[in-house]
Amino acid sequence: MKFSDSTKLILAAGGWSETRRSNVREAENLAKTKGFPVFAAWTDFVSRFGDLSFANPAAIPPALEEWHFRAAETINDTPLNNLKYYETQLGLPVAIIGKGSDDYLLFLINEAGVIFGAFDEQIFQIGITPEDAIEAICSGRRFVAVDS
């Protein structure tokens, strides 16, 4: 999936480019030390979007005004029990990639690359691929509630 022009502008303003790659070692080591899962889809996502923060000042809800994919920071701030709760509700392993909505929405990715958002006890499917999820975050496409 290609990003829309408006999404590309938001991503570029946050420092992203199609050729950008970040070092995942810090986040990976922290995740493993804390007992959080790490798998290929997580590594790919963090290498492409990790350590970036984004703002959409023209956001019309439900588009997010701000979010980040600072995986190491988010892993450090999230208790393992919270992640285990979301894995139990979803019935599959997920890994942490960032936060949005003033850090209330926890972004998760599964082994297939599906992106979820978790807010308290609610879980939403944001996109079926990382690109689809980012487009949804930027455009305001409604997230789909996951039945647990």
Image (cartoon, rainbow, N blue to C red):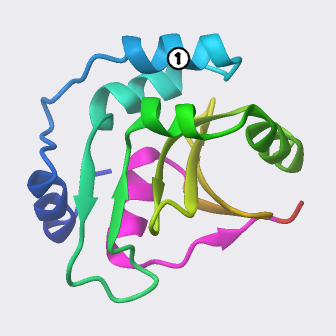
Q: Position of residue 70 (x, y in %)?
A: 38, 39
| Residue type of the residue flagged with mark 1 | Leu
User: Is 112 drawn above or below residue 148 in the view shown?
Assistant: above
Q: Position of residue 123 (x, y in %)?
A: 72, 61
Q: Position of residue 112 (x, y in %)?
A: 61, 34
User: Farthest bottom residue?
Assistant: 60
- Which of the 4 quarters of the picture holds residue 77? top right
Name the residue located 27 percent from the left edge and 51 percent from the top edge. 53
Q: Position of residue 139 (x, y in %)?
A: 34, 75
Instruction: Answer few, some or many: residues within 10 Å of disc 1's Cα (few below 14, many 20 plus, some between 14 and 19).
Output: some
User: Is 98 drawn above or below residue 48 in the view shown?
Assistant: below
Name the residue located 15 percent from the left edge and 58 percent from the top edge. 8
- Which of the 4 quarters of the picture holds residue 17? top left
User: Is 146 drawn above or below residue 16 in the view shown?
Assistant: below
User: Is 94 drawn above or below residue 141 in the view shown?
Assistant: above
The residue tagged 1 is 30
* Residue nearer the viewer, 53 or 128: 53
- Residue 51 falls left or right of residue 91: left
Where does the magenta region start and end? Answer: 128-146
Q: Is residue 94 magenta?
A: no
Q: Secondary structure at mark 1?
A: helix
- Residue 5 falls left or right of residue 40: left
In which quadrant will I find the C terminus?
bottom right
- Which of the 4 quarters of the picture holds residue 119? bottom right
Name the residue located 74 percent from the left edge and 64 percent from the top edge. 120
- Residue 130 falls left or right of residue 35: left
- Residue 13 falls left or right of residue 7: left
